[in-house]
Amino acid sequence: MKRILAIGTGGTIASQLAPDGLQPELNTDQLLSQVPAIREFCDVVCNQLCSIDSTNMSPSRWVQMARAIRDDYDNYDGFVIIHGTDTMAYTAAALSYLIQGSPKPIVLTGAQKPIGSDSTDSKMNLEDAFRCACSNLCGVLLVFNGKVMLGTRARKTHTKSFRAFSSINYPELAYIRDGRVLPFIVPESRERPTFYDRVDDKVALLKMIPGTDSALLAWMLEHNDALIIESFGVGGMPSYRGTEFHDLMAAAMKQGKTIVMTTQVENEGSDLAVYSVGNSLKTRLGVLEAYDMTTEAVVGKLMWILGQTRDPDEIRRLFYRPVAADILIPTSEA
């Protein structure tokens, strides 16, 4: 029987109704007591790291999770992190960089409805997550609604329905049916994982809308070490204020700021070379391009990279180096 460490963080799955709405109240032992089948196929030890609504998740909590797994890595065959759904994709992506190449499965799951609800997805998701943690899959994974996704590719795409998460620009790794994990793709792993415990949380995200004021761009660049810009379509910056946007970006990069261009469009990724509004960002400014990465993965990767180095060449090298199949760079760019 495999030994699994269950790490509790709160979330909807552990919530009960309070006067002002749902709040996390149940600990991990209490959750598992409602799914007794889990302890019939694995030996579970619980570690309650925190009990929060995942809206309150933070980079420091990601480091705490990674350390908890590092400290007990040799004592368990797999790990399950019980997490709120709203920021679960960010956590899954961040942990993919903080724990690289794990030959053991590190599985995140949660629920759209509390475990005490008459109609809840929590019990199925919990059992599926522990089944996955006992399987031959590896790395950081997200299990939800019978599907297994890479941590770097998962995104919450539905706010209420049980099919809350989708795998973006990458196939699902496995399905879980009738208590069996049916894998299609086994992620790459190493003999031993590499753990990191430093991040830089001064990473911001600017979502462009028609008419965005350049003063907002200037403020965000001034107050952060890196800025991710979610532009339109395949990517670009507006010219309705002349070269003001480009000039601000160029000045910030000379000061050592990191800028990544990505797209608001969920599928297929960016391609700055297509239009003149994007081409000069690459050829003149040399900004980084996210290609088919999710925004959640870009956030986690930048925080991890900037926690290790401030050298621009090394930042560029690490950003374009695939980690857990997070990025597919066109052949012409590789």
Image: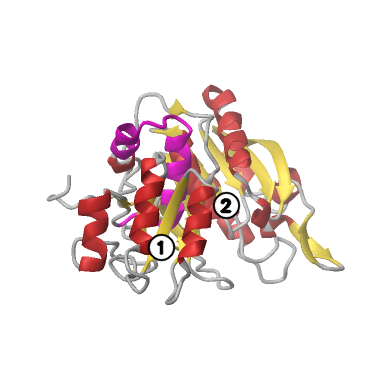
Magenta residues (range): 292-318
Please give left or right for residue 273 compared with residue 136 in the image: left
Question: Which secondary structure lies at badge 2?
Answer: helix
Q: Residue at x 34, y 40 (%)?
A: 323
Q: Is residue 81 left or right of residue 177?
A: right
Position of 219 relative to 7 (above/below): below
Query: Label 2, on which residue?
Result: 127
Q: Position of residue 206 (x, y in %)?
A: 47, 61
**Disc 2 or 1, which lies upstream in sequence?**
2
* Residue most extreme to the right: 19
Q: Residue at x 52, y 71 (%)?
A: 158
Q: Position of residue 103 (x, y in %)?
A: 40, 32
Q: CA distance from mark 2 to mark 1?
A: 36 Å
Q: Residue at x 55, y 38 (%)?
A: 79
Residue at 57 percent of width and 42 percent of height: 80
Question: Would you place residue 98 above or below residue 72 in this image?
Answer: below
Residue at far bottom of view: 210
Quadrant of the frame with the C terminus: top left
Circle 1 is placed at which residue position? 230
Q: Residues within 10 Å of mark 1 (few under 14, many from 20)?
A: many
